[in-house]
Amino acid sequence: MGGGDCILPQASKDNQAMDIETVVALAAPAADATAPKIEEENKDANIDDKGIVRKGKTSYVWSHFTALPVAENGGKYLAKCHHCPKKYGCHPTKHGTNSMNKHLKGAHPSIFTKGGKKGTLHNFMPKAGEEGEPVKVSKGYNFEEYKKSVAEFVVLDEMPFRVVEGIGFRRMVKKIEPRFPVPSRFTVSRDCFQLYLDEKKNLKEWLAKSCVRVCLTTDCWTSNQNLGYMSLTAHFIDDEWKMQRRIINFCQIENHKGETVGREIEKCLREWGIEKVFTITVDNASSNDLAIAYIQRKLYARGGLVCGGKYMQVRCCAHVLNLIVNEGIKEQHTSIESIRNAVRYVRSSPQRTKKFKECIEAELIESKSHVCLDVPTRWNSTYLMLQRA
């Protein structure tokens, strides 16, 4: 075919009349030889002013790219890869799909098989399930979802951020999903914080829409570095009538005075938009009485109390029980203190601990546990110390 000549296909008996549009398309003159050749797989996608790809005769690359709204990109036509954060121009008349095609071949070779391009993203056959049924494998790959999954793994299993930089972890991820670039520990830390912000936003919206009242639990303590900390936990009933609890605050405080604790609680409630509080559970420290009185004054003015806050303060039963037990064992204080000193002596150095174990074996005493030291604020630790002794 050359110049303006064209060759029309001969009509078959079954198809005596050809479509007019097909005839016009075939009869059209060929493009100039100097014009760039565009392969069928690289024909431009039909994109509207909003940047949305309209389905039609488009390239396969649009199964792996999503056109972004033009208004959100300063009037630019951009498409984002489903498998990584890369973006490429996708103007209907200015850009083809060659750049996106090269990106898929270079950065995501697992998309292709020996037979060429394929629609699914896995080049392996899934194993049969326990009942002989084939395992369902996702045909899509979302880079952002994989990043979120890594952040959830670190949070739920309480793993350090540097776990993603371990050799074993990276090998495992490459075998499971070779297209996913394992992020660094700095990226994971940012993803975990972003996950917290997203969950906080969702919980705030739910509390404002569905939750009527919440119950709070707070406690303060001092760390080994002489730093004061306070935690605040919210308890509420969800839409399915199940008890839920969420730590809504964990902060460092200047001191354990009642007014200081009360201000921190008020600040947290304002941040979460919580105005209706049913009860606040605290221990028996006298400073907590002042903190409860402070919160009562603030919430009473907003109409967020039940019965004027008369039953707002709930004393922690575990703390009350600990005070009762400690008061009762004072009668045996001398004996308990002697055992406590003996345990301290045994645990004071590795040599003494080793010698103590040798004495146990020499006396043919069968014991899988070792002596332990109690904590004054936990009565059950004193019981365990006496039991093992």
Image (cartoon, rainbow, N blue to C red):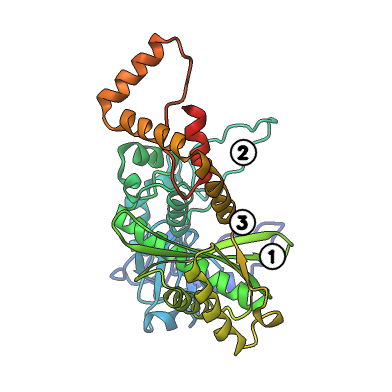
Quarter of the image that includes the N terminus: bottom left
Please indicate whether residue 61 sits to the left or right of residue 358 in the image: right
The residue located at (39%, 77%) in the rendering is: 77
* Position above or below: 309 against 321: below
Indicate which disc residue 281 carries.
none
Do the CB atoms of the residues marked 2 and 3 lie less than 8 Å apart? no
Work out whether residue 183 can be spotted: yes
2 vs 3, front mark: 3
Work out whether residue 85 can be spotted: no
Q: CA distance from mark 3 to mark 1?
A: 22 Å
Q: Which residue occupies the foreground of this view, 45 or 238?
A: 238
Please indicate whether residue 236 sits to the left or right of residue 30 in the image: right
Residue at the spot of label 1 = 237
The kind of residue tagged 2 is Val
Q: Secondary structure at mark 3?
A: helix
Mark 3 or mark 1: which comes first in sequence?
Answer: 1
Q: Quadrant of residue 311?
A: bottom right
Please indicate whether residue 253 sits to the left or right of residue 208 in the image: left
Mark 2 or mark 3: which comes first in sequence?
Answer: 2
Indicate which disc residue 317 carries.
3
Indicate which disc residue 135 carries.
2
Q: Residue 242, image x and y in percent?
A: 71, 59
Q: Secondary structure at mark 1?
A: strand
